[in-house]
């Protein structure tokens, strides 16, 4: 199946639920706007996408106080179906429709897959509360929306690995968006969109297809540039201090070096570059 055919299916499903999704996002917009939709693709196709995922040993392991997960963006190294489903979400019709759902104009997809692509989380993996980098790789456009499509069959809520958003800050309870099979979750990104992924506590691998949408203008008028900034979970005071210090140091570096000291390797480098 080609990318455009995959996009056709996604477009039809989103269109069917457009009004409901608009209501979801509008109801959460004042904090961290978000919506989710289940049964996005035919089950046989989702299973094929899941089975196309590489083994975690074939992906980039990211392990630190901040996070522990496996990622990949150099999609020409993997099953072509994975690249097709990623770029299906970048179809102009879908970008426009998602913009209508969220009432956001000027959205643009990211063909470079900067921090996008695919991710895998296994037992013991986690992603601490954090703010995503405010911009794209060239620091030209603002990061606006995060699209996460989950494809692991029979992934139960008790297994962990779920998206958590903290609209009232880390001092207050989070909202959990479960990473259920064949679910697309979309969340807004701005200077207060703290989010995390709960630790995976079961055998198995939670697999996800990721995309970001950007814009020439920020989602919030008061938004300012920031690097990816991590915090610890509530109660982890020492870790929170260390992660806060880490974020401040990296922010100081970016004030001097606009694009950082080195290029972020998490992007899709195509042959014609």
Image: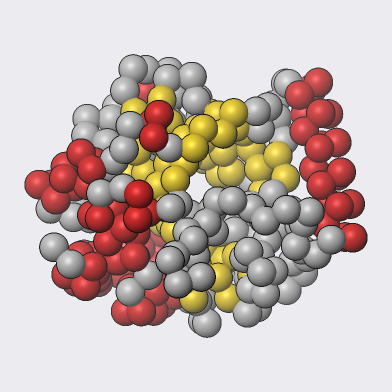
Which one is nearer the viewer's eye here, 226 or 82? Answer: 82
Query: Observer-nearest residue: 24 or 188?
Result: 188
**Can residue 30 be seen at all in this image of the molecule?**
no
Q: Where is residue 262 drawn, in percent x and y?
A: 73, 53
Is 235 situated above or below 128? Answer: above
Quadrant placement of the N terminus? bottom left
Position above or below: 158 against 261: above
Q: Is residue 204 left or right of residue 173?
A: left
Residue 201 visible in this rendered orientation of the protein: yes
Measuring from the top left, give residue 82's x and y in whole percent: 29, 52
Residue 25 is situated, as x and y percent measured from the top left of the image, at: 46, 62
Tell me the residue at 44%/65% (across/down): 270
- Give the quadrant of residue 54: top left
Residue ID at (50%, 76%): 107
Name, please, the residue furthest toward the left: 44
The answer to whether 224 appears left or right of 3 in the picture is right
Outermost residue to the bottom = 106
Side of 168 relative to 19 (left or right): right
Q: Nearer the viewer, residue 104 or 128?
A: 128
Residue at 63 percent of width and 79 percent of height: 216
How many marks on residues? Answer: 0
Among the 4 quarters of the image, the one containing residue 2: bottom left
Image point 31% across, 48% down: which residue? Answer: 78
In this view, 55 is above or below 218: above
Q: How is the image coloured?
A: secondary structure
User: Residue 26 at what x, y percent from top left?
Assistant: 48, 65
């Amino acid at each position: 199946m080609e990318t455009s055919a995959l996009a056709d299916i996604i477009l039809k499903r989103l269109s069917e639920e457009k009004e409901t999704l608009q209501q979801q996002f509008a109801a959460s917009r004042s904090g961290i706007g978000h919506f989710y939709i289940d049964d996005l693709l035919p089950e046989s196709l989702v299973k094929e996408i899941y089975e196309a995922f590489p083994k975690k040993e074939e992906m980039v392991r990211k392990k630190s106080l901040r996070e522990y997960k496996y990622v990949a963006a150099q999609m020409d190294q993997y099953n072509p179906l994975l690249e097709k489903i990623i770029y299906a979400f970048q179809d102009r019709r879908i970008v426009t429709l998602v913009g209508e759902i969220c009432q956001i104009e000027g959205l643009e997809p990211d063909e470079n897959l900067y921090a996008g692509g695919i991710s895998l989380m296994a037992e013991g993996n986690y992603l601490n509360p954090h703010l995503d980098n405010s911009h794209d790789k060239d620091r030209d456009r603002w990061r606006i929306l995060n699209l996460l499509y989950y494809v692991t069959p029979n992934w139960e809520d008790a297994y962990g690995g779920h998206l958590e958003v903290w609209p009232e800050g880390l001092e207050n309870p989070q909202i959990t968006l479960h990473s259920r099979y064949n679910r697309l979750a979309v969340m807004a990104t701005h200077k207060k969109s703290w989010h995390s992924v709960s630790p995976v506590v079961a055998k198995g691998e939670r697999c996800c297809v990721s995309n970001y949408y950007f814009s020439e203008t920020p989602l919030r008028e008061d938004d300012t540039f920031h690097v990816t900034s991590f915090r610890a979970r509530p109660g982890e005071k020492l870790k929170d201090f260390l992660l806060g210090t880490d974020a401040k140091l990296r922010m100081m570096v970016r004030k001097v070096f606009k694009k950082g000291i080195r290029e972020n390797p998490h992007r899709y480098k195509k042959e014609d570059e």
